[in-house]
Amino acid sequence: MSEPSPPSFPKHLLDFKDWNRAQLESLLETAQMMQEVLARPVKKVPALSGFTVATVFFEPSTRTRISFELAARRMSADVVSFVSSASSTVKGETHRDTLRTLDQMGIDAYILRTDAAGVPHQAHRWLRKPVINAGDGWRAHPTQALLDAFTLRERLGSLEGKKIAIVGDILHSRVARSNAELLPMLGACVVACGPSTLLPGHLPGVRLTTNLREALEEADAVMALRLQKERMDRGLLPSLPEYIAGYQITEARLAWAKPEAPLLHPGPMNRDVEIEGTLADSPRSLVERQVANGQAVRMAVLYHVLVGKR
Amino acid sequence: MKGDILFKDATLVDARGKHGIADVLIGEGRILSLFGGEAKRTIEAKGLYLSPGFLDLHTHLREPGQEVKEDLQSGLEAAVRGGYTDVVSMPNTSPVVDRAEAVRALKEKSARIGFARLHPAAALTQGQEGQLLCEARALREAGAVLLSDDGRTNEDAGVLALGLRYAASWGLPVAVHAEDAGLRRGGVMHEGEVSWRLGLPGNPAYAETARIARDLEVVRYVWEGLGVRPQGETLLHIQHLSTKRGLELVRQAKREGLPVSTEVTPHHLTLTEAHLEGLDPLYKVAPPLRTKADVEALLEGLLEGSIDCVATDHAPHTEDEKALDLLRAPFGIPSLEVAWPLLYTKLVEERGFPLPTLVARFSSDPRRILGLPPIHLEEGAEASLVLWNPSQKRSVDPRGFASKAKYSPWAGWTLLGWPVLTLVEGRVVWEADF
């Protein structure tokens, strides 16, 4: 290949602060290549042979962990996993001790999930090894945003000037925050919508609204977020029916968006809460496609973080 | 006249001003003369400043029960290394200091240790549970100088009103951590653009201002019904003021003659919410680091005196605790050993803040809140003093701290004004190698 100067990549993916558009575009192209690998009968390449990757999940998430582990294995990396709940960590070993212990075992990259914002940054300071953020508190979930972007581009082509509506609990959503960071970098206009108790006061580069119709009108794609039931317990919402009546994405409401505008959801879905159950299974829904693309995107991220060049 | 120590060619700076160079003779725990004399020891103090010792109204020394974080030995040594001759320890220990025996035990143990003098604060309510009042009379007799449920917030305004009234009858001011628990919720940093972007639970400025507004009305209510001037001019002392709006409320209340006072910490004067960008729990503190506009307002308030004094809220935790994640790491920043050089450098050297005013905010002003007279550098004055170096630069190295908290948000900052020797009642309690 005779590309003049292939972009070099940050050796970590904590959020998108250290990444620029060229690097991200290049990463998504690599994901496209990985997609082709995954379409083969033998879905394995030797790219990461000899590397050992650890998934360290201080907050359980089977789906994301499996997606990362498969991504690593399909590139021939060795994978170990550490899973613990936040409560057991509080009683005993700290995150730092756990990570330093693992670090003595020759791990080459860490994939980290925690319920608290910032742990991937802390880990990056403690370990000086590649750290990939698999979700930290309300803050960031960069591979989710990358797979969302990948899925959107697969359906819409370039995201330049495209209006993407994100609907639901924006305030407590790392998926919303990472998409709000990434999609505008790729040229999209992001509108985030939800009841005002679930909206931040401000998000850079994002239009915030409580009006669902305004958010969906002219939208090129709609993303519904999972509603955590504990929001009701903390008094942020009066009731589930109240939320459903105001913000559930239904077939009728999706008609406010552009014809054919696809529907995304980061999963796991609460059917008939944030999204009408039948709509989730309709051709408008890209939910399954997102899951499939997740693996290709995570392969690309691991590859760039560990090997670095194309 | 024969003394113990002679400071030769020391530059005198107290709350009244900078008084030029003098040969200060110390003996019998007092300043014997400003014109030299014979002494057992002569200290060459040319180029060094001599000031009244500092008093910290807000220190967490963690004893009893939390000695893994700090204890009297380490905390009182940290104090004198920072130029403090007197510290007020907060009662949110384990168990809570809410009984006369506990106050007496702290007084006795600290006297044996030496270093800085300890003035314990005791709880306002039993167990700091916000319900039943402590024995203010007995606590005062045992040596408590202040009552506070600090570490907790006083949610019940009725209990606070009773507490203020009862404490006033025994001449004790009440200090409050003014944050509304309901508005603060689980906030770990200032609520605003940074917290929204970072996805961290926010603690809004209004948690502080709503509580200050309420407490000022409670003071007004108590004051109107009381009629007796409290001993130290203060009924209610608002701890660690952090917001511009909070300052406006306090300023207005003082203008109306309400007996209130307030303090500001070194971190709220030098750090902002932007320090949370690196997602390091080192900067997690309550009330949280605020905005640039708040910092500027607080500086203004300290200059004009609406903010009475600087208090550290020195809040040591173990390094392991501060390496937990941002949701679980405890709140607090230790600062006893850097407060003076930090503010001397950032305020006086870099911003032109008047030096005598800063000295006052570290010494005579907090003393006034406790009803203590100022220490002026004149013949007969109590020799609780600090000698410090206004011109030697040194960078902050927490590994050298006497405090058990060997970390600092100011690590690596190059500062001037480091104390070199501290005297308590004429005794050298600490001196640097110089």
Image: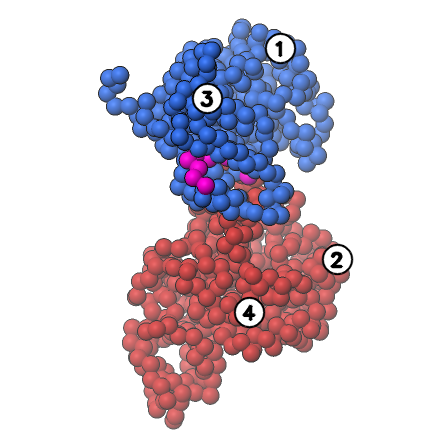
Say which of marks 3 and 1 sits in front. 3
The location of residue A169, given as percent across then percent down, is 60, 27
Q: Which residue is mark 2?
A: B131
Seen in the picture, residue A289 relative to B385 is either above or below; the reply is above
Chain letter corresponding to the colour blue: A
User: Chain B's colour?
Assistant: red
Q: CA distance from mark 3 to mark 1?
A: 29 Å
Q: CA distance from mark 2 to mark 1?
A: 57 Å
Q: Are marks 3 and 1 on the same chain?
A: yes
Q: Which mark is residue A281?
A: 1
Query: Could you say which is closer to the camera, residue B283 or residue B70?
Result: B70
Q: Dot 3: few (<14), some (14–19), or many (≥20) neighbours within 10 Å? A: many
Mark 3–mark 1 CB contact (< 8 Å): no
Q: CA distance from mark 1 to mark 4?
A: 66 Å
Q: Quadrant of residue B182?
A: top right
Amino acid type of the residue that numbered disc 3 sits on in the rendered structure: Arg
Earlier residue among tags 2 and 4: 4
Chain ID, mark 1: A
Q: Are marks 1 and 4 on the same chain?
A: no
> Circle 2 sits in a helix, a strand or a loop, which is it?
loop
Residue A113 in magenta stretch: yes
Q: Which mark is residue B72?
A: 4
Q: CA distance from mark 3 to mark 4?
A: 58 Å
Is B398 placed left or right of B167 in the picture? Answer: left
Q: CA distance from mark 2 to mark 4?
A: 29 Å
Mark 1–mark 4 CB contact (< 8 Å): no
The location of residue B211, given as percent across then percent down, is 63, 50
Q: Which residue is mark 3?
A: A74
Amino acid type of the residue that numbered disc 2 sits on in the rendered structure: Gln
Chain ID, mark 4: B
Q: Dot 4: few (<14), some (14–19), or many (≥20) neighbours within 10 Å? A: many
> Circle 3 sits in a helix, a strand or a loop, which is it?
helix
